[in-house]
Amino acid sequence: MGTLLLTHPASLLHDMGAGHPECPERIKAVFERLEREEFQALLREEAPLATAEQMMRVHPERFIQALEQSAPHQGRVRIDDDTLMNPGTWPAAQRAAGGGIAAVDAVLQGRADKAFVAMRPPGHHAGRETAMGFCFLNNVAIAARHAMAAHGAERVAIVDFDVHHGNGTQEIFYHDRHVLYCSTHEMPLFPGTGMPEDTGLHDQICNVAMHAGDDGRAIREAFRQIVLPRVHNFAPDLILLSAGFDAHKFDPLANLELEADDFYWMTGKLCDLAAHHCHDRVVSFLEGGYDLEGLADSASAHVRALMGR
């Protein structure tokens, strides 16, 4: 077994227009970095399309149909102020969700220890019936529901270290005692959610507010004091990561001061918990990260940690 990389060229065809920060060049930067010699041991598969049944474990059928019907045959349509669809968007979104499902299958069937789903569009802002914040389908939520429905997982931990709070993921699992959602995110910042007092119906939501200028020392302390103990006490069957790299110090959309080594450290600590609780099983999803160099450095550090290097 080893670490599985899920990708697909469809990610390159989703394009929200010139100057948009969530651009095809993001995935190109990640793809190019993961072609280097140090990553040749990665297992590699193409992300399949998610089925309607799989997506409907999270999103109502009417929402999925509305998204599919909104997809243009040419040009772009605006879903909200910063979220647009072009002809490549819906296939890319289906494969971003499908990649997560395939990754969960591989990890829970013992064909891989860990997996990284290097796809776009991202997903953690997508609610049950809301596409927003560059997101259409909530990829990590669909994967969590799949792990429970198809593989009998009883406790799934989602750790989200994107600099923006995953409001969609929190909404979806707010009442679910079987899913722990932990998020570290800058406040105040888009989308304006993620207050520490938002703890979920069963005290299974854990929001850790970071502040402009916080660096690697601050995020590591937050992990040591709050995130890692919460995941440890939850004793998950599977750990899922919303791996956003926009907390990097070069990112134009936020104000934290993390470096690539901080993402390596966080990932390594979460992998240690996976070794203790769930037979090494970790599936990670690419979320944000909008400085191309910072994204490539951080994502490659993240994958090295998943590989145990």
Image: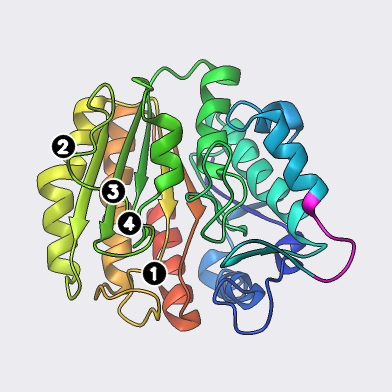
The answer to which of marks 3 and 2 sits earlier in the sequence is 3
Magenta segment's dominant SS is loop
Closer to us: 195 or 269: 195
Q: Which residue is mark 1?
A: 246
Mark 3–mark 1 distance (CA, rounded to whole Å): 17 Å
Q: Which residue is mark 3?
A: 194
Closer to us: 108 or 192: 192
Q: Which residue is at 20% across, 72% downward? A: 212
Q: Which residue is at 80% across, 55% downward? A: 71
Query: Where residue 55 is drawn, which disc sits there?
Result: none
User: Does dot 2 land on a helix, a strand or a loop?
Assistant: helix
Q: Which residue is mark 4?
A: 192
User: Quick one: quadrant of the C terminus?
Assistant: bottom left
User: Quick one: quadrant of the N terminus?
Assistant: top right
Q: Residue 260, position in %: x, y?
A: 33, 72
Q: Amino acid type of disc 2?
A: Pro
Q: Which residue is mark 2?
A: 229
Q: Amino acid type of disc 3?
A: Gly
The residue stretch that appears in magenta:
70-75
Mark 1 or 2, which is nearer the eye?
1
Q: Residues within 10 Å of mark 1 (few under 14, many from 20)?
A: many
